[in-house]
Image (cartoon, rainbow, N blue to C red):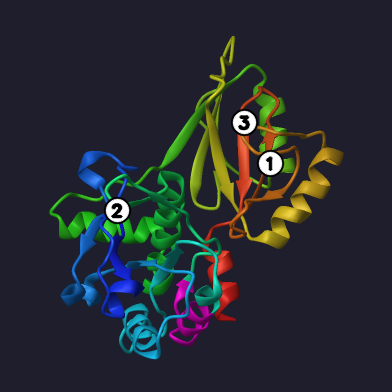
Amino acid sequence: MPRLMLFDLLAAQGEQPRQMVLPSVLPEREKLVPVSATEVDTADAVLVVTRDTPPDQKSLDRLSAIAANGDAPFGKAVMLAGSPGIGVEAQRRALDAAKAFVFPRLAALIDGPDGGATIGAQDLSEFCAFADSVRHFASGRTSSERQALDAVQDGTPPLWLNHLNLPTTDLARSCRFYIHVLGARYVKHLGADKVVLNLQGFDLFLQQAEAAAVHPDFHFGLRVDRPTLMDLAERLPARGAEIVRGPGPRRGPYTISEGYRTAFYVRDPDGYLIEVYTPEQEMLRGLTA
C-alpha cells in the first residue's frame, strides 16, 4: 500500500494550510498513511493541494524537490487536487521537470463546514492504484514479486496462486477454446475427466462436470500488452468467442477515463467471464519513453 504525503502549496507560500481529511477508502488495516515533510523520502506518493492562483517559484521548487526521488531515475506518483486555474499548468510543468508521474485527472476538493476539505473517495482510491503501479514499475519488480518480497521481509512465507480449476460441461469443447482461441498450452491429463493447460506459467485445470454453475460476479483476468489486446479483440469473434460488455462501460475494447488501462470481456463456452486487459505499467512506460 503506498504511503501518501500531503503537500499544501498555500502553506508553502507562508499562508495558513487547510485541514485535510482523507476518506477511508480501504480496510482499516490498510489505510493510506499521511507522512510529515521530514519523511519525504519514505513517501511513495504525493497529494498536492493546489489553488487557482499562480504559485511562487519557491513553492514550485519545493514541489519539485518533494516529487523527485533522489538520484533514482523515476519520481513519485503525484495527484493534484483542487480547482482548475492558472496555477495548475505551472505545477504540472514543475512535476514533469522532476520526472514525477502525474495522475492524469485533477482531483476535486470537497469543502467542509469547518473550513477544511476532503478528497473524494473515488479520486483517492484510483490514485492509490495508480501510485501502487508507479511504485512497482520504478522498483523494477512486478506486483507479485514485490508482494512476495514484502511477505518474506515480514516473516510470512510467500504463497503463490498456482492454478484455477474450472468445471465444464464439455471437456473437449473447453480444451479447444482455451488452446485454439486463447493460446493455452496442453500439459497433461489427470485421468479421463480432467485436463491441465498452461497460460504463461499459470495452470488452468478443466474438469468434466454435469453442470458449470457460474456466479454472475465471478471472472478471471488475462493480462496482455495493448497490441495483443487489440489483435485478440479483432480475431476472437471469428473464432467463435463471444465478446460481451461485462462490468465495463461498453462491449468491446475500452480505455478507462484515466487513460492507463485498456480491457474487454469475453465468455468461454460454459459462460465463464474472462477479462483481457493491459497492465497499468504500459501507460507508465509510455511516459518514460
Sequence-wise first label, 1 or 2: 2
Where is mark 2, residue-wise? Answer: 116
Specify whether residue 95 is painted magenta: yes
Which residue lies at the image location 61% right of the left edge and 41% below the top edge? Answer: 275
Can residue 197 be seen here? no
- Return the residue nearer the eye: 88 or 186: 88
The amino acid marked with disc number 1 is Ile
Which residue lies at the image location 31% right of the left edge and 60% below the top edge? Answer: 2
Q: Which residues are magenta?
A: 90-101
Task: In the displayed orientation, state which residue is furthest to the left.
Answer: 155
Occupied quadrant, residue 100: bottom left
Where is mark 1, residue-wise? Answer: 179
Q: Is residue 34 left or right of residue 118?
A: left
Cβ–Cβ under 8 Å for marks 3 and 1: no
What secondary structure is found at the residue carrying circle 2? loop
- Return the residue nearer the eye: 167 or 10: 10
The amino acid marked with disc number 3 is Leu
Which SS does the magenta portion mostly show? Answer: helix
Occupied quadrant, residue 14: bottom left
The amino acid marked with disc number 2 is Gly
Q: Can you say which quadrant of the picture contains the N terminus?
A: bottom left
Between the C-alphas of marks 3 and 1, the distance is: 17 Å
Where is mark 3, residue-wise? Answer: 273
Near mark 1 (Cα within 10 A), the count class, few <14, some 14-19 or many ≥20, is some
Sequence-wise first label, 3 or 2: 2
Between the C-alphas of marks 1 and 2, the distance is: 57 Å
- Return the residue nearer the eye: 246 or 154: 246
Q: How many marks?
A: 3
